[in-house]
Image: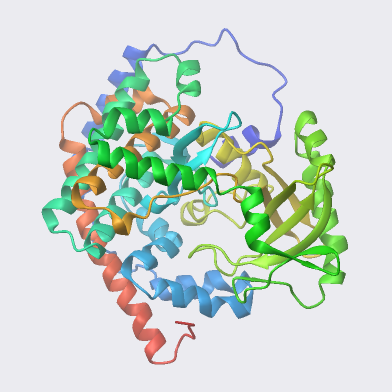
Amino acid sequence: MAAARQRRTHDVPTTTAFDAPVPTPDERKAAAKAIRKATPRSVHGTWEPATDRPDPVELLVEQNRTRVPELVPLRFGRMATSPFAFLRGSALVMSHDLAATPDAGIEVEVCGDAHLANFGIFASPERRLMFDLNDFDETALGPFEWDVKRLAASLVVAARANGFDRITARRAVLDAVAQYRDWMERYSAMTHLEVWYARIDVRELIEARAAAAAARRRLEAQLTRFEGKNHLKAFAKLTVEVDGRRRIVDDPPVVEHVVGEDVFVPRLEAVLAEYRLTLSADRRALFDRYRFVDFARKVVGVGSVGTRCWVALFQGPNGGPLFLQLKEANRSVVEQARGTELATHQGQRVVEGQRMLQATSDVLLGWGTDEPTGHHYYVRQLWDAKGSIDVTTLRPAGFGTYAGFCGWALARAHARTGDSVSIHGYLGNSERFGESIADFAEAYADQTERDHALLVTAIERGAITAII
């Protein structure tokens, strides 16, 4: 498995077996059905913490040892606000738990952190709005069930936070898994090239799914807001002119210039020089038209708080700005939990995983290394018509619809990077897998609430410092 990662990422095979026999779809489907005997779909419904389960708070404390120390209390403070916030920040904990659960042995490039807030809307290079996964820090090779279970558990935890009853929460999980299963069946009937070109256009989605005119108007208004979240908007909001030069506005602790930034500038330039070489020739030419102006440290997300993250401002020849985000990439929690071999470059792992999983990715995705420290970074545009649905505002019906969209997007991503025929063959057409996942999601939501309580208790008794 680890060898496959290294081979795919870094080595060029000397020969290609174009004539190597490939099992037919019928053969692969039959083989996948046979897996049910050893790993019945019902086994996915069980969650019981092992007696030697690692302490979740200790896992998080250990994970923080490589992070920016002064930001760690902010991370714990954000995670302590609710069980859903805890779930968002504890992908490492859940990966360790999932490693102790059965799987069918069908691997894909997993997102590794496929909770419902890690799906969103962004603009394709053609400037059309797409719905897809939008976080790839933990991507790696892994069992397809891991992403499905993390999405399902997040749906139950979020539904509880919204005050929905158990029936509504369970129905949302069943909707998500049903969409995953049904779309996987559709993708299994396509050629792989057709799967690769498949995408979820948001405006087409609204037209097909939002029957009520009022609902369409609300969604259209949100899309207009996302489209306006661009470099010019960021330029107006995040910068100010100082002595004739644009500077990023400090907003501690979320955005701030750091002490000794003059020393860091040459290192930043070295990271960007390596990053430039990871771009294709046409995108390198695009990047070369811009000149560096300013940079600052930026805190992002919940689970990512404490990782090194910078936002850099560039100016174009015609006056337009470009904002790039340089975000530290550490070892995937999936690789940690499974004990698989480290990727050679963690930023490269994130970028290549994103390109495989997303239908269309940021044209300026790349990676680089801060050589003095050995920290790996991936680089992407900031505020490039990106946005996400605020799930706390959804009503029960809308929550279920959104859950289905997430299931669809996850199926498309897994069909691109795995064998859709085998996954479909294993899942079948019944509700058995969905019912099992719903059972697991409820049990793991209970576990998340217990783990969240442990964190809150540790903060209250002073064992952990948190900025609330």
Q: Is any part of residue 223 visible from this angle?
A: yes
Q: Residue at x 51, y 31 (%)?
A: 359
Q: Position of residue 43 (x, y in %)?
A: 21, 45
Q: Which sits in the foreground, 378 or 296?
A: 296
> In the rendered view of the protein, which quadrant contains the C terminus?
bottom left
Up-down relation of residue 171 to residue 81 (above or below): above
Query: Relative to residue 261, is residue 342 drawn left or right?
Result: left
Q: Is any part of residue 134 visible from this angle?
A: no
Q: Residue furthest top?
A: 19
Query: Relative to residue 208, is residue 20 drawn left or right?
Result: right
Q: Residue furthest bottom?
A: 461
Q: For residue 419, which quarter of the picture?
A: top left
Q: For residue 308, which quarter of the picture?
A: bottom right
Q: Residue at x 85, y 54 (%)?
A: 270
Q: Which sits in the foreground, 235 or 187?
A: 235
Q: Position of residue 311 (x, y in %)?
A: 69, 59
Q: Position of residue 183 (x, y in %)?
A: 31, 27
Q: Residue at x 33, y 40 (%)?
A: 217
Q: Position of residue 191 (x, y in %)?
A: 44, 14
Query: Relative to residue 367, is residue 262 drawn left or right?
Result: right
